[in-house]
C-alpha cells in the first residue's frame, strides 16, 4: 500500500489504515509505504483519532513501515514508529513483488 494523501481528516488515509488493520487481522501482512504528503501521518501527534493511531502503531509493530527517502525528514518521524527509508528503486522492486498495489 502506498499512502500519498495527507493525514488527519483524510478519508483516504483512514480507509487505507482500516484496510491495513483488516489485512493484518486476516494474517495477511502488508507493506505500507508513505510518500510525499503521506509522510505527515508519521509525525508524532498527527493523528488525533485514537483508533487510527492504534491501526498505525499496530502496523508499525507487526510489519514495520516504509517511507520514500526523498520525502523523508527523520526529525519529524514519531520515534515510537518503526519506519525504514527506501529509495525509489527499492520501492519499485517492492511493488513488483506484490500481487496488488493500492494507493491512498
Image (cartoon, helix red, strand yellow):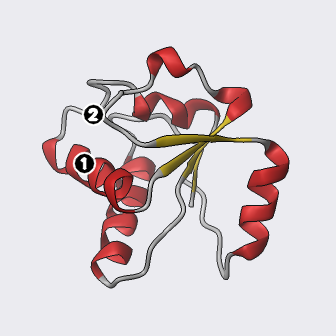
The residue at 53%/32% (across/down) is: 39
Q: Residue at x 27, y 78 (%)?
A: 25
Q: CA distance from mark 1 to mark 2?
A: 7 Å
Q: Hey, which residue is sitting farthest right in the picture? A: 89
User: Residue at horizontal 52%, vertical 56%?
Assistant: 32
Q: Quadrant of residue 81?
A: top left
Find residue 31 and report its horizontal and vertical position in percent: 54, 63
Q: Residues within 10 Å of mark 1 (few under 14, many from 20)?
A: some
Would you place residue 96 above or below residue 78 in this image? below
Question: Badge 2: few (under 14), some or many (20 or more) residues near its Cα, within 10 Å?
Answer: some
Residue drawn at x 67%, y 28% as measured from the top left: 71
Residue 34 lies left or right of residue 100; in this view the side is left
Image position, residue 49 (x, y; %): 18, 40
Q: Where's residue 54, x and y in %?
A: 21, 50
- Residue indicated by mark 1: 52
Q: Which mark is residue 47?
A: 2
- Image height check: is 21 above or below 40? below
Where residue 36 sits, quadrant-wise, is: top right
**Which residue is more in the foreground, 43 or 38?**
43
Q: In the rendered view of the protein, which quadrant contains the N terminus?
A: bottom right
What secondary structure is marked by label 2? loop
- Tag 1 near tag 2, CB within 8 Å: yes
Amino acid at each position: 500500500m502506498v499512502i500519498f494523501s495527507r493525514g488527519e481528516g483524510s478519508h483516504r488515509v483512514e480507509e487505507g489504515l482500516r484496510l491495513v488493520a483488516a489485512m493484518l487481522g486476516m494474517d495477511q501482512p502488508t507493506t505500507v509505504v508513505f510518500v510525499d504528503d503521506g509522510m505527515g501521518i508519521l509525525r508524532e501527534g498527527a493523528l488525533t483519532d485514537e483508533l487510527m493511531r492504534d491501526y498505525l502503531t499496530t502496523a508499525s509493530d507487526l510489519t514495520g513501515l516504509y517511507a520514500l527517502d526523498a520525502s523523508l525528514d527523520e526529525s519529524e518521524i514519531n520515534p515510537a514508529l518503526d519506519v525504514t527509508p527506501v529509495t525509489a528503486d527499492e520501492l519499485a522492486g517492492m511493488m513488483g513483488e506484490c500481487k496488488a498495489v493500492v494507493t491512498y
